[in-house]
Image (cartoon, rainbow, N blue to C red):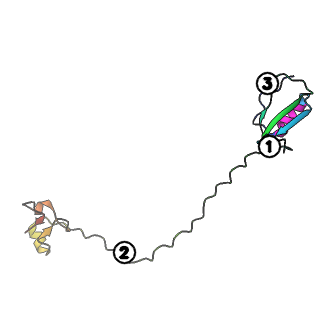
Amino acid sequence: MTLPLDLAGKTAAKVEQELRALGFTALRYLGPNGAPVTVDSTWTVVSVDGAGSSVSPDSEVTIRVDKPVPPPPPKTTPKVTPKPAPPRTEEPAPPVTAYYKNCTAARAAGAAPVHRGDPGYGRHLDRDGDGVGCE
């Protein structure tokens, strides 16, 4: 009788069931350190000595097993306590926008001279390009 090749990776209970169905009666289990063990049916078969070879059904079959690796714990999302919103303060005033058609309008509004970055500054007010309009 030929020992099956596809036994590694199955549970000890499944391998034992398959081997007994083939007529094998003498099964010996060895743990990871090579010592005989009383196997738990959930252990995983690592190998079967002589797998794929012909042996008589009354031969002792050595099955090497290891404890199953426990599944990793379920991933949990940590609970995050939201931070309280900062106290409301007055809304800042919207930025002042201004447009002066010409320097006469800028002077009339009291904005002249208008510097680059100031509301109302425009290149059309800065003839020499030095960053100061309506000087």
Q: Nearer the viewer, residue 122 or 29?
A: 29
What's the distance in space between the residues labelled 3 and 1, CA to CA?
22 Å
Q: Amino acid at mark 1?
A: Trp
What residue did someone put label 3 on? Answer: 52
Q: Position of residue 128 (x, y in %)?
A: 6, 60
Give the residues drawn in magenta, as a range: 12-20
Local crowd size for mark 3, using a 10 Å CA cut-off: few (<14), some (14–19), many (≥20): few
Q: Can you say whether 85 is above or below 78 in the image?
A: below
Q: Earlier in the sequence, mark 3 or mark 1?
A: 1
| Distance between mark 1 and mark 2 Cα atoms | 67 Å
Image point 72% across, 46% down: which residue?
Answer: 69
Can you tell which of label 1 and label 2 is closer to the viewer?
A: 1
Viewed as shown, does residue 20 lie left or right of 99?
right
Secondary structure of residue under mark 1: loop
Q: Residues within 10 Å of mark 2 (few under 14, many from 20)?
A: few
Give the x, y percent position of residue 33: 77, 42
Image check: 55 left or right of 118? right
Amino acid type assigned to the residue bearing label 3 in the image:
Gly
Residue position marked by numbered label 2 in the rendering: 91
Q: Where does residue 13 sit, x and y in percent of width and height?
A: 84, 39
In the shown orientation, is residue 122 left or right of residue 84? Answer: left
Secondary element type, mark 2: loop
For the residue pair 96 and 4, the one nearer the viewer reads as 4
Mark 3 element type: loop
Quarter of the image for residue 102 reads bottom left
Three-letter residue code for mark 2: Glu
Q: Position of residue 55 (x, y in %)?
A: 86, 23
Quadrant hosting residue 42 = top right
Q: Which residue is mark 1?
A: 43
Image point (79%, 27%), residue name: 51
Choose the circle earlier in sequence order: 2 or 3.
Answer: 3
